[in-house]
Amino acid sequence: MDGFEVSPVEGLRSPVVVVSFTGWSDTGTVTTDAARHLIDTLSAERFINVDPEEYFVFTETRPEVRLVEGGLREITWPTNEAWAARLADTPHDLIAITGTEPNLRWEPFASRFASAIAALDPSLVCTLVARPAATPHTRPIPVSGSAADATLARRFGLEPSRYQGPTGIIGVLHDAMRKHGLPLVSVAASVPHYLSVDENPPATLALLRALEPMLGFLPPLGELERESVAFLERVEEASSGDDQIVQYVRALEEQYQEGDPPLVQPDSELSADDVLRDVEDLLRGDGS
């Protein structure tokens, strides 16, 4: 048993695959929010479900308790799934893979996913990344893309892949799909490092817009544009009354570059952390 429950899915037209996982590669759930937005707005149907017992240590990635109707408590377990959407008037159908980075058995997990996806003969696989960067919330979210294949890089105007260093399940799955000969690209949003909150609609919106050349159509944006405006208004409310925060953001504005701003490692200690905690507290509802 590998924990994979795969339902038959027939007749997909050279699907484009979008891949996202929480964890190392997903600052503020930006990539998984983008994938979930595609799933919801395009009425996708789940065809792969992975048993969490096979791939998680629950003392490290804990299930969550949520209150449901009637005040009852419900356990939500970490999930890993694939969804398919059949799209009219577009050149490709869509597959969205989304879930939680597992704790265990990455190689068999990635190999099994890659085999199941390769069997559907996708035209392109696009992995999504959101990373903390020294970029201000007052400027557009920088989005960059890369591809190891020179033809794909030219086709979509991407840079060659040059990253070396630690990776997450996205990198392992990317490698497993490469072994099947699948065409691979990656798109990364640079998220202001001081907004490490559970959502960032402007960054999610930027990723979805950047997917247009790969998908062949602009994904439905729904309420994301309104949510992005409201989010930025809340950030301004939290930051504008503090001179230290204003000065820090202004310094980031002076250094801002759209292409690929300096990264901030998730485990680094930032001198601005204490200064900017008020922003995060307000966005989480801990401030007033």
Image (cartoon, grey):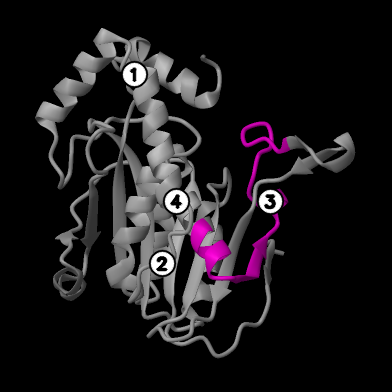
Three-letter code, disc 3: Pro
**Cα–Cα gap, marks 1 and 3:** 40 Å
Label annotation for residue 239:
1
Mark 2 and mark 1 residues within 8 Å of each other at the beta carbon: no
- Asked which secondary structure carries label 4, the reply is helix
Q: Which residue is mark 3?
A: 52
Quadrant of the snapshot with the N terminus: bottom right
Question: In terms of secondary structure, where does tag 1 sit?
Answer: helix
Q: Is residue 102 left or right of residue 193?
A: right
Label located before the other in sequence (4 or 3): 3
Badges 1 and 4: C-beta atoms under 8 Å apart? Answer: no
Label 2 belongs to which residue?
Answer: 219
As helix, strand or loop, the secondary structure at mark 3 comes to: helix
Nearest to the eye among marks 2 and 3: give it: 2
Q: Residue furthest left?
A: 254
For disc 4, the marked residue is 224
Q: Is residue 7 left or right of residue 257?
A: right
Vertical placement of 44 versus 268: above or below?
below
Tell me which label, 2 or 4, sits earlier in the chain: 2
- First along the sequence among labels 2 and 3: 3
Cβ–Cβ below 8 Å for labels 2 and 3?
no
Cβ atoms under marks 1 and 3 closer than 8 Å? no
Q: CA distance from mark 1 to mark 4?
A: 22 Å
